[in-house]
């Protein structure tokens, strides 16, 4: 009987202690919270075109599965509060960029520091990120552009980048560095390139591969983002 009481007591202690031993993961939200935590890190994740056109877990014939929910979960597991919503079919990219700018402004108005806000976009989502950055002169928030800079920028000479910018691209992909775009006046306050080499072309960003997740998370969590020489 005494042994049974001891087991029950130790089990109770374990259950009480467990929440304090487990790290809290970030949240996944569809829109900015009304009462944000000022020192939390907020990341707007903007998905690629195939998620908009097909669904949250589409399979591309060449690039394979795009696991949008798993990407959100992985980013949240790095103690980031992820804000993301699947865009409707036919969404206009520039108009949606204006929506993102309004949501960023809402967080700023509610006391979140600029360095704790990141707009992270892949492919079509990265193009929206570029539009949003161009619409925010003087804003010192973070912009991560993944596999989005390519020849289309030639036809958009008025686009510029603002804030702190990280450009991530896959060496086997058709998209390339955003350095040329970053060089347009007035230019971002900080710029960094990260080239990954998975051999998966555009599909390198379809899953939460450490090849891109880790450098992106590290950059987001770094207070001072270095500028390329």
Image: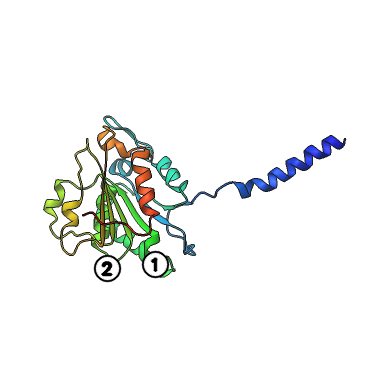
Disc 1/disc 2 C-alpha distance (Å) = 13 Å
Disc 1 designates what residue?
108
**Residue nearest the viewer, comparing 59 with 121:** 121
Q: Is residue 95 above or below residue 149?
A: below
Query: Which quadrant is home to the N terminus?
Result: top right
Task: Indicate the secondary structure of the residue bearing disc 2.
Answer: loop
Q: Who's the residue at 43% across and 57% down the image?
A: 41
Res. 86 in view: no
- Which residue is situated farthest in the top direction here? 61
At x 44%, y 43%, the residue is 74
Residue at the right extreme of this rendering? 1
Count of numbered marks:
2
**Image: 208 above or below 88:** above
Q: In this view, does 205 lie to the left or right of 19?
A: left
104 vs 146: above or below: below
> Would you name the residue on which mark 2 appears?
138
């Amino acid at each position: 009987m005494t042994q049974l009481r001891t087991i029950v007591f130790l089990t109770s202690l374990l259950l009480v202690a467990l929440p304090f031993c487990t790290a809290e993961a970030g949240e996944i939200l569809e829109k900015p919270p009304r009462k944000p935590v000022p020192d939390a890190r907020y990341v707007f994740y903007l998905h690629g075109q195939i998620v908009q056109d097909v669904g949250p877990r589409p399979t591309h014939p060449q690039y394979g599965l795009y696991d949008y929910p798993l990407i959100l979960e992985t980013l949240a597991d790095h103690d980031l509060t992820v804000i993301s919503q699947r865009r409707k079919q036919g969404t206009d990219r520039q108009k949606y960029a204006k929506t993102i700018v309004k949501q960023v402004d809402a967080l700023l108005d509610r006391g979140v520091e600029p360095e704790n806000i990141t707009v992270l976009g892949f492919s079509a989502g990265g193009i929206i990120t570029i539009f949003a950055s161009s619409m925010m002169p003087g804003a010192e928030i973070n912009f991560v552009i993944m596999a989005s800079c390519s020849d289309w920028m030639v036809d958009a000479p008025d686009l510029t980048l603002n804030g702190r910018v990280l450009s991530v691209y896959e060496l086997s992909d058709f998209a390339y560095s955003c350095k040329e775009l970053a060089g347009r006046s007035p230019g971002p306050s900080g710029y960094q390139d990260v080239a990954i080499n998975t051999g998966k072309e555009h599909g390198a960003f379809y899953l939460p591969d450490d090849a891109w997740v880790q450098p992106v998370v590290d950059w987001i969590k770094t207070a001072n983002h270095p500028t390329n020489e």
